[in-house]
Amino acid sequence: MMGDPESALEEFDAALEINDEYAEAHLNRAIVLNDLGCFDEVSDCFHRASALDLRDSRAFPSHMGNQLANAHARTGDLYLAADRPEKAAAEYAAVVEIRPSYLDLRFKLAEAYMDLDMNEEARLHLEEILALNPRFLGARVRLGALLGRLGDNDGARREWERCAERNPDDRRIQAYIASLGD
């Protein structure tokens, strides 16, 4: 968008191929299309951006919700660094309420819950992460650890073996599996 609208449009199209739910790319694509005089497509792009803008939370438009979510996440990180997992968990829970699809921050909430021995809550969040993204290896490793902590060695083994299928050379995962014995 720095004087080369055709290239900008190509970049926004490429971004939308990766993630069609990227509201800001739809919005900026509409602006570029308007500048190029492609008025037939502008309205569709604005409508798509508007629909996506409130998708994650009806309470906040995306730019404001994203800023609030990130502010809560930073505050949670500070509380965690200050060894205040209960306060960190409250901040991460606020993030999940605002942006439930931010799986990395949901993961931090699950870890804070694990630190607080809120194991059922942690398990629910880890399972939700894996339902939304089965390839989130860190969540699978932590779910295995949590299941092991809860005495479900079969469940822990199952999770860690799924990790080992994806990363057979990861010694940490092999050590987790070995810790369960035969």
Image: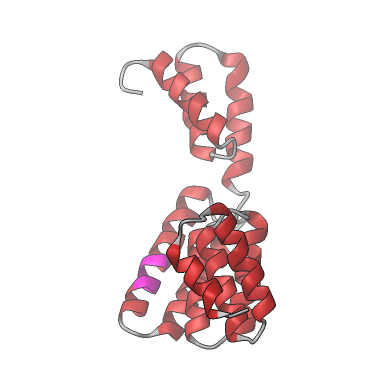
Residue placed furthest toward the top: 37
Q: What span is colored magenta in the figure?
A: 73-77
Left/right placement of residue 8 relative to residue 133 reads left
Left/right placement of residue 93 relative to residue 7 reads right
Front residue (pair 134, 3): 134
Residue 52 x/y as whole percent: 60, 42
Residue 146 x/y as whole percent: 58, 79
Residue 67 x/y as whole percent: 42, 56
Does residue 95 appear anywhere in the picture?
no
Q: Is residue 108 above or below residue 84?
A: above
Q: Quadrant of residue 182?
A: bottom right
Front residue (pair 119, 154): 154
Q: Is residue 5 above or below residue 177?
A: above
Residue at the location (61% across, 64% down)?
161
Front residue (pair 140, 162): 162
Residue at the location (52% across, 81% down)?
114
Quadrant that contains the N terminus? top left
Query: Is residue 74 one of those drawn in magenta?
Result: yes
Residue 177 x/y as whole percent: 55, 72
Does residue 159 appear anywhere in the picture?
yes
Residue at the location (50% across, 87% down)?
116
Q: Is residue 156 above or below residue 59?
A: below
Q: Quadrant of residue 75?
A: bottom left
Colour pattern of the rendering: secondary structure
